[in-house]
Image (spheres, helix red, strand yellow):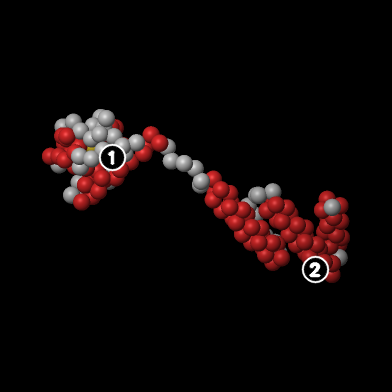
Amino acid sequence: MATAKKPAAKKAAKKAVKKPAAKKAVKKVVKKVAAKKAVKKVVKKVAAKKPAAKKAVKKVAVKKVAAKKVAKKATKAKSTRKPNAAFMKPLNVSAVLAEVVGSNPLPRTEVTKKVWDYIKKHKLQDSVNRRNINADDKLKAVFGGKKTVSMFEMTKLISAHLK
């Protein structure tokens, strides 16, 4: 459909070079061809940065909004998954860690949350490198005597105190 019009646009462009009065008509044809190409790119999910005509811009905007609505519906359908039971299982806390988070059995996720609450409450996060935690006396015992621990290493060291 669009391929049949492309040769016509080329022929009109060649004639326009010879006749100055036909230049306006050629510009219109070129704009129409460019607009159709832009719409095709959107259909193929290729981002069109420069739509040639106002009509194409409106069509692009409508199709993008429709695509976003479809994507939102797809994510809502996927979000009905169950949490992993291993994370929710209450674990016994060692005496050293109990000084920070309490002595009740807690799931692994809750222990990490409570340790972070303790770190923020006592302002133990390093001010220069926010990934590091400067341990006080209670946390130093939990971290195996280390004074500074990265947040990624922290969960590894805490898991040794959970049974």
Q: Residue furthest toward the left? A: 137
| 2 and 1 marks in contact (CB < 8 Å) | no
Residue 4 or residue 157, whichever sits in front: 157
Rendered location of residue 55, percent (x, y)? 71, 65
Compared with 61, 156 (above or below) is above
Element assignment for label 2: helix
- Does the image show residue 111? yes
Sequence-first disc among 2 and 1: 2
Residue 75 or residue 80, whichever sits in front: 80
Rendered location of residue 4, percent (x, y)? 86, 52
> Residue at left 49%, top 42%?
81
- Judge from the rendering whether residue 91 lies leftward or rightward of residue 121; answer left or right: right
Give amino acid for label 2.
Answer: Lys
For disc 2, the neighbor class at 10 Å (few under 14, some 14 to 19, many from 20) is few
Element assignment for label 1: loop
Residue 17 or residue 4, whichever sits in front: 4
- Judge from the rendering whether residue 42 lies leftward or rightward of residue 158; answer left or right: right
Q: Label 1 belongs to which residue?
A: 106
> Residue at left 84%, top 70%?
21
- Judge from the rendering whether residue 112 lies leftward or rightward of residue 44; answer left or right: left
Separation of marks 2 and 1 at Cα, in angstroms: 76 Å
> Residue at left 66%, top 49%?
45
Question: For residue 108, which quarter of the picture?
Answer: top left
Rendered location of residue 159, percent (x, y)? 28, 32
Question: For residue 99, which quarter of the picture?
Answer: top left
Rendered location of residue 121, percent (x, y)? 20, 51
Give amino acid for label 1.
Answer: Leu
Quadrant including the C terminus: top left
Residue 17 or residue 67, whichever sits in front: 67
> Residue at left 80%, top 62%?
29
